[in-house]
Amino acid sequence: MTYQFDFGWLIEALPVLLKGIRITVQLILIGAVFGVALGIACAWVRALGPKWLRPVVATYVEMIRNTPFLIQLFFIFFGLPSLGIRMSELTAANLAMIVNLGAYSCEIIRAGIQATPRGQFEAGASLAMTPFQAFWYVVLVPALQRIWPALSSQIVIVMLGSAVVSQIAAEDLTFAANFIQSRNFRAFETYIVSTLIYLALAILLRQLLAGLGWMLFPRKASR
Amino acid sequence: MTEFSFWDILRNLLLAARWTVVLSLVSFLGGGIVGAGLLFLRIGGRRGLRLLSRGYIQLFQGTPLLMQLFLAFFGLGLFGIDVPAWLAACVALILWTAAFLAEIWRGCVESIAKGQWEASASLGMGYLQQMRYVILPQALKVAVPPTVGFSVQVVKGTALTSIIGFVELSKAGSIVTNATFQPFTVYGLVALIYFALCWPLSKSSQLLERKLNVAHRNH
């Protein structure tokens, strides 16, 4: 193999890369917060919510979990305008990530809720908690604590999956990489660099979420 | 301009879905073989090999599949190989699948009680014999539901190969959209076809889990 590696373009490309990183980080921050919130709401519906709403949520979860993120993204960005719903690339990317993470985190959180003994909910009610208070403090918080590692993994998976949003021209890190390699004709090097950035982001995000879990759920005697 | 009926669209998408199925099978089988190799290195091999296998798994689990596809597409070319999209797609998907399957199976092997290793060692079995006669038969039962569950991720993963130009279901969706200007119908149908492929796998994974768990409890 006589290929000469060349990373000389890196300095010049740095601003573009940084902007891509910024957008990717922004996407995952918004996606994670609203996605998990949606997941909690859906898990509440499936566990305790109104009966008529449960099949709706179940259908949403199954549809999202059994179709590729790329198609969800295309459907939102290219398909919805037929119904008169138009949005920018970034909004579509955000929406797709929220909808996607919402379905997965619903399943994960529900698993945590199911592991909570029913008696605990009744115990909360007997302490004169409102159903909402009982759900929040007695059911949800211990459930989140139990499934935090799984939820963190899912958030990292969604972050890595976000590379696909470059396909609707949302200017994330992958978009930046595509842009740079179309200028310098150094495709392999460009993608190695961006792959390593993704790896660093994934490791960082994992650490951050572990720290957050540590802060939110101070060591409680495990059952 | 030619008019496309609903059936024209569906027929074209279904024809392309064949390639999604073929690619999924190739990735899953190839990934299974490579993954089994990684698993043996990860739990049995020497320290250096163990670290290597762990690094491999972390690398492939910690980076986007799309980047791996790009690297395979442009990287293989550096070796002077003319890389058609299907080759890059197969290579990347097999390597990616292997990392996940190795990690899933490691969890299954580690779920086997330590006493089983010790008992078989005390019978004078070597590492390979322990694996062959004691550990793997038990781990296999635990491994079936998550492995079937992961196959759903593989089918969905094949959608990304459309980005490097492999014409499977997703790419066909884009092509048909460009011809018909009906993105809502086309991507809706594409999603439904993926759902039809994946949902039976998800469901059977859940059923197997329940079934094998019940068996486990009765022991």
Image: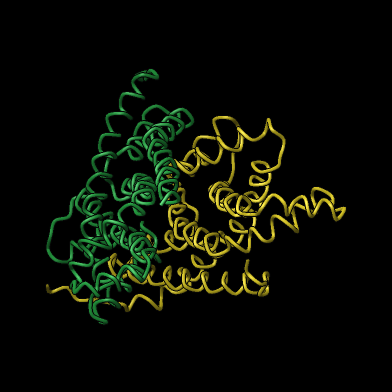
Q: Which of A162 and A121 is in front in this view?
A: A121
Chain A, which colour? yellow
Q: Where is residue A142 in the image (x, y as percent from the top left)?
A: 67, 61
Q: Where is residue A198 in the image (x, y as percent from the top left)?
A: 43, 68
Residue at x-position 58% and y-position 30%: A83
Q: Where is residue B110 in the image (x, y as percent from the top left)?
A: 36, 66
Chain coloured green in this rendering: B
Where A26 falls versus A130 (above or below)? below
Indicate the quadrant containing the C terminus of chain A: top left, top right, bottom left or bottom right: bottom right
Q: Give the residue furthest to the bottom.
A: B47
Left or right: B18 as drawn, with respect to B6: left
- The number of numbered badges drawn on the structure is 0
Q: Which of A153 and A180 is in front in this view?
A: A153
Q: Kindly tell me whether residue A181 is visible in this rendering.
A: no
Residue at x-position 40% and y-position 66%: B62
Residue at x-position 53% and y-position 64%: A149
Left or right: B138 as drawn, with respect to A21: left
